[in-house]
Amino acid sequence: MNFASDNVYGVDPRILAAMVAANEGTARSYSYDNLTAAARARLAQVFEREVAVHLVTTGTAANGLALSAATPPYGAVICHAEAHIAVDECNAPEMFIGGGKLIGIHGRGGKITPAEVANVLKGFIRGEHDPKPATISITNASEAGTVYTPAEVRALADLAHGRGMKLHMDGARFANAVASLGCSPAALTWQAGVDIMSFGGTKNGGMMLEAVVIFDAALARDFNYRQMRGGQLVSKSRFLAAQMLAYLEHDLWLENARAANALARTLAARLAQVPGVRLGHRVEANEVFAVLPRAAHEAWQAAGAVYYDWLPDGLAEKPGPDEVFARFVLSHATPPAAVERFLTLAQK
């Protein structure tokens, strides 16, 4: 009954098999191999246009490198206060940028709005004494498991571009957002104004499966140098590419995301029926947030349920003194039987 994270589960067997197959023979190194070329071409098909693609090993590296391309060392990145780049990446974005500043907004439900961003930008009145607003970064699906629609992304992009800024999307759970909305990857990214994104796969079946996908050609200039300097130009790059090809083949990435999202909906619907439990907000991807009676929480964890206490920043429901705010994350690999065991325990 492990709902701590979608990182706790292993690698999808189809992706593992692809890596084993890639182990045969020899290949050129440092992303000049045929598999990397094929992975780049496949991502161009997924996004329905030419894109620059750089495969990396971690989401932190993908975010840091992407933001460094969009943000000068004297620049500012506007993001949600609880965004992964702000609270979980140990200043890596600032390091990759070379001194940039992250400015967090306490937006509701893990999302930020154009009005909230515009309000922050009003404070930049001191010219060169302030960092230069350079980038808006959004996470889709968000850290709260909510999803930005194409219209919401477009509104933020229009604000960013109107101020001479860029729009970055942290897509660590991008597959879950696409699966939730039923839209095309293109509609949720470049067609809505995204300039650069981190395309994640590690949380959805990969081993080390992340990519920086660049839609604005100007941001792709010299990116290979950024990648090399950042220690992310992998010598045996064919193994990253093999993962990406398997991930995209037959829409495995969406199949896995749909499975995780469906389990989250099941868990949320039935957990909400437990006396004393109330959901933090509507479940839109593969994360469930709920306020739990403290006594029930302690009993469930003692019985082997694994999930995290969480900070209820920007969420509709706040825990009382005898309650716990909890996060449950579902994976495509979460056994449905584990969900049933937990729900049986919770509904006793």
Image (cartoon, rainbow, N blue to C red):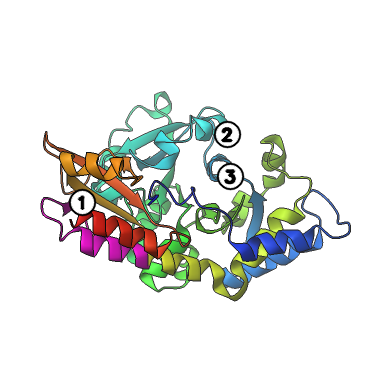
Which residue does the image show at 80% across and 63% down from the upper left?
34
Instruction: Give the residue at mark 3.
Output: 58
Query: In the rendered view of the protein, which quadrant contains the C terminus?
Result: bottom left
Mark 1 vs mark 2: give the one in front: 1
Label 1, label 3: how many angstroms apart (C-alpha)?
29 Å
Label 1, label 2: how many angstroms apart (C-alpha)?
34 Å
Q: Position of residue 341 (x, y in %)?
A: 32, 58
Which residue does the image show at 34% across and 36% down from the upper left?
104
Instruction: Give the residue at mark 2.
Output: 96
How many residues crowd around disc 1 within 10 Å: few (fewer than 14), some, or many (20 or more)? many
Q: Amino acid at mark 2?
A: Phe
Instruction: Give the residue at mark 1.
Output: 280
Which residue does the image show at 63% across and 46% down from the upper left?
57
Asked if residue 302 is positioned above or below residue 158 in the image, the reply reads: above
Label whose residue precedes the other's in the sequence (1 or 3): 3
Label whose residue precedes the other's in the sequence (3 or 2): 3
In the foreground, 176 or 229: 176
Residue sitting at the far top: 129
Which stretch appears magenta?
262-281
Label 3, label 2: how many angstroms apart (C-alpha)?
14 Å
Q: Amino acid at mark 1?
A: Gly
Q: Position of residue 259 (x, y in %)?
A: 43, 68
Q: Quadrant of residue 146?
A: bottom left
Q: Are marks 1 and 2 in contact (CB under 8 Å)?
A: no
Q: Is residue 268 magenta?
A: yes
Q: Quadrant of residue 20?
A: bottom right
In the foreground, 214 or 31: 31
Element type at mark 1: loop
Is there any visible trace of residue 50 in the rendered image?
no
Asked if residue 29 is positioned above or below residue 186 in the image, the reply reads: above
